[in-house]
Image (spheres, rainbow, N blue to C red):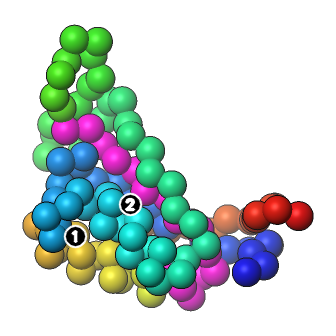
């Protein structure tokens, strides 16, 4: 796929311990993106957060278990991102998960090996 120029970035932020179909929700999202043939996905684990439920998460040196934020970032053409964001909203409903889903326009300078 040649992905350059105008595109959209989809960002989904959920809790690390959210689960659906007996697997981590962030993992299910990445596998769904691969099955949907999106250009790519990256999962980033956050260190500190707060959200709608006003709970704080922090990565302290001696903290063994926490529900850290997981940010899944996906980039593709606008139509595919908009369709996939609707699918993801339903998946978060299925998982009874909170979180946020948003997308924004981006300019892809380079994708893959040139």
Q: Secondary structure at mark 1?
A: helix
Counting every numbered tag in the picture gives 2
Residue at the location (23% across, 31% down)? 57
Asked if the residue under mark 1 is in contact with the one under mark 2, i.e. CB atoms within 8 Å, the reply is yes
In the rendered image, residue 15, in percent from the top left (x then y), is placed at 23, 48
Q: Which residues are magenta?
A: 67-82
Indicate yes or no whether the magenta region holds residue 41.
Answer: no
Residue 12: assigned label: 2
Q: Secondary structure at mark 2?
A: strand
Front residue of this view, candidates 59 and 101: 59
Position of residue 48 relative to residue 91, above or below, is above
Q: Viewed as shown, does residue 28 lie left or right of 10?
A: left
Q: Is residue 100 visible?
A: no
Residue 92: assigned label: 1
Screen quadrant of the C terminus = bottom right
Q: Earlier in the sequence, mark 2 or mark 1?
A: 2
Residue at the location (19% across, 38% down)? 67
- Residue 20 is drawn in which quadrant? bottom left
- Residue 23 is drawn in which quadrant? bottom left
In the rendered image, residue 66, in percent from the top left (x then y), is placed at 18, 32
Residue 32: assigned label: none
Position of residue 68 relative to residue 10, above or below, is above
In the rendered image, residue 21, in percent from the top left (x then y), is placed at 15, 70
Q: Is residue 104 visible?
A: yes
Residue sitting at the far top? 62
Q: Residues within 10 Å of mark 1 (few under 14, many from 20)?
A: many
Position of residue 57 relative to residue 60, above or below, is below
In the rendered image, residue 29, in percent from the top left (x then y), is placed at 35, 67
């Amino acid at each position: 796929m040649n992905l350059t120029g105008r595109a959209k970035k989809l960002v989904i932020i959920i809790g690390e311990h959210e689960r659906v179909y007996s697997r981590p929700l962030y993992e299910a999202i990445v596998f769904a993106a691969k099955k949907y043939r999106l250009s790519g996905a990256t999962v980033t684990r956050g260190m500190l957060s707060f959200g709608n439920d006003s709970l704080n998460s922090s990565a302290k040196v001696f903290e063994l278990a926490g529900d850290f934020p997981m940010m899944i970032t996906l980039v593709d053409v606008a139509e595919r991102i908009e369709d996939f964001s609707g699918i993801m909203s339903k998946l978060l409903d299925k998982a009874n998960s909170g979180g946020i889903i948003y997308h924004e326009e981006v300019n892809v300078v380079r994708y893959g090996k040139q």
